[in-house]
Image (tube, grey):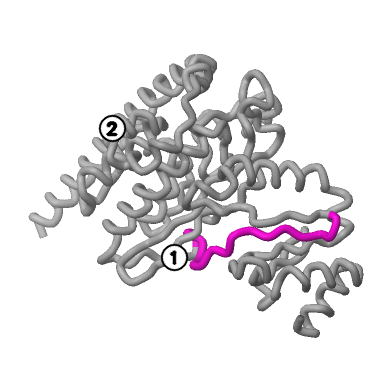
């Protein structure tokens, strides 16, 4: 192992035994980044030859947050069916006794830092839809919610004219059957820019302790992430007012299917509806689906909130149309002035 990396491990607080075990199992190649938990390295498994992202924890962090880390590890294993679900990071190995976990190494950059080439925006959108919608459907089918979908938690690798996407950072994920009513927010969960109107209102009221999160919140956040990326990272502050209307402000440069699916993600927030309209998108995962009826149970729980959504959509639609009428009036006035000039 590189002496500089050994020094970093020691400064982090790892014991000699920890370092020896890590070195026996991984060829640590390169420092990638750090956080409050410790550091991340690019490493190769000596047993399988697999390229991994090796997360090294500060022993004090492991000791104080062990329960949370173990919960994340359990979710990573179960949510991805032990790495059988594509397009989502998965766990290779975990050994908290020696302060490390290894995940699949994902090349590319996060979507927040990625600039979509103008000539490839349609291909970008189609690859995004074809890969991440079935993946999210499988995650939900396994009983899990991501709870923090946003561009920073989606990785993209651009190879020639193709794009590969992955969900990452599943630390806030939740198993829906841990409680009878699904997953609650349990404090600050997710990123406000990608909240639905109802969740944003709950946070503003500071009424989030018992606010339950359902599949549609993930679906909405995925749709906003796509729309946000296709529209030059336009800040989605106030996005709820515009996108709660029945039509998104498209620039009409995308195919009808791309616009329809993206709009449905944001407005309907229901992957099952999209699956019925575009079954070919979900054909590759049909054999992986679990034949259980929990979706209907959760739909029943969420029915009242769904009705509230529709009322909010009607109100937002009226406001949006009023705004558009005003803008059209200003445009006509401007054109009249140009004619005079």
Mark 1 closeness class: few <14, some 14–19, many ≥20 residues within 10 Å:
some
Residue at numbered disc 1 = 157
Estimate the x, y position of residue 236 in percent, counting from the top left: 45, 47
Estimate the x, y position of residue 24 in percent, counting from the top left: 77, 71
Q: Which part of the image, by quadrant, shows the N terminus?
A: bottom right
- Whether residue 264 is visible to the viewer of this picture, yes or no, is yes
> Is 136 left or right of 33, judged from the image as shown?
left
Asked if the stretch drawn in magenta spans residue 99, the answer is yes
Q: Secondary structure at mark 1?
A: strand
- Residues shaded magenta: 97-112
Q: Is residue 172 above or below residue 304?
A: below
Estimate the x, y position of residue 245 in percent, counting from the top left: 34, 32
- Residue ranking furthest to the front: 47
Q: Residue at x 70, y 75 (%)?
A: 28
Q: Which mark is residue 321?
A: 2
Q: Residue at x 68, y 71 (%)?
A: 46
- Whether residue 223 is visible to the viewer of this picture, yes or no, is no
Estimate the x, y position of residue 88 in percent, counting from the top left: 52, 51
How many numbered markers are drawn?
A: 2
Q: Residue at x 35, y 47 (%)?
A: 129
Q: Spatial distance from mark 1 to mark 2, Cα to Cα?
A: 39 Å
């Amino acid at each position: 192992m590189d002496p500089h990396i050994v020094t970093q491990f020691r400064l982090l607080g790892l014991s000699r035994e920890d370092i020896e075990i890590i070195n026996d199992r991984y060829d640590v190649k390169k420092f990638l980044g750090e956080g409050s938990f410790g550091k991340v390295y690019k490493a190769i498994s000596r047993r399988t030859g697999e390229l991994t992202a090796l997360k090294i924890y500060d022993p004090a962090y492991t000791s104080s947050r062990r329960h949370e880390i173990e919960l994340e590890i359990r979710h990573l294993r179960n949510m991805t069916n032990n790495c059988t679900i594509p397009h989502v990071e998965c766990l290779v190995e975990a050994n908290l006794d020696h302060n490390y976990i290894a995940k699949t190494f994902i090349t590319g950059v996060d979507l927040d830092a990625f600039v979509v080439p103008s000539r490839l925006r349609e291909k970008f959108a189609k690859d995004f839809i074809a890969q991440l919608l079935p993946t999210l459907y499988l995650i939900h089918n396994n009983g899990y919610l991501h709870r923090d979908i946003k561009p920073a938690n989606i990785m993209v690798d651009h190879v020639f004219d193709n794009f590969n996407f992955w969900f990452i950072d599943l630390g806030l994920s939740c198993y829906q059957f841990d409680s009878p009513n699904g997953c609650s927010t349990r404090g600050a969960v997710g990123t406000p820019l990608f909240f639905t109107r109802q969740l944003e209102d709950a946070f503003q009221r500071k009424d989030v302790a018992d606010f339950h999160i359902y599949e549609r919140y993930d679906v909405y956040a995925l749709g906003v992430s796509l729309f946000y990326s296709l529209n030059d990272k336009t800040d989605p502050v106030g996005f709820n007012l515009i996108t709660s209307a029945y039509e998104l402000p498209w620039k009409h440069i995308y195919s009808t299917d791309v616009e329809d699916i993206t709009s449905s993600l944001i407005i309907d927030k229901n992957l099952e509806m999209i699956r019925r309209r575009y079954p070919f998108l979900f054909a590759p995962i049909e054999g992986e689906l679990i034949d259980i009826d929990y979706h209907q149970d959760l739909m029943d729980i969420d029915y009242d909130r769904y009705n509230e959504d529709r009322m909010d959509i009607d109100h937002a639609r009226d406001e949006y149309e009023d705004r558009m009428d005003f803008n059209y009036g200003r445009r006509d006035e401007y054109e009249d002035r140009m004619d005079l000039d």
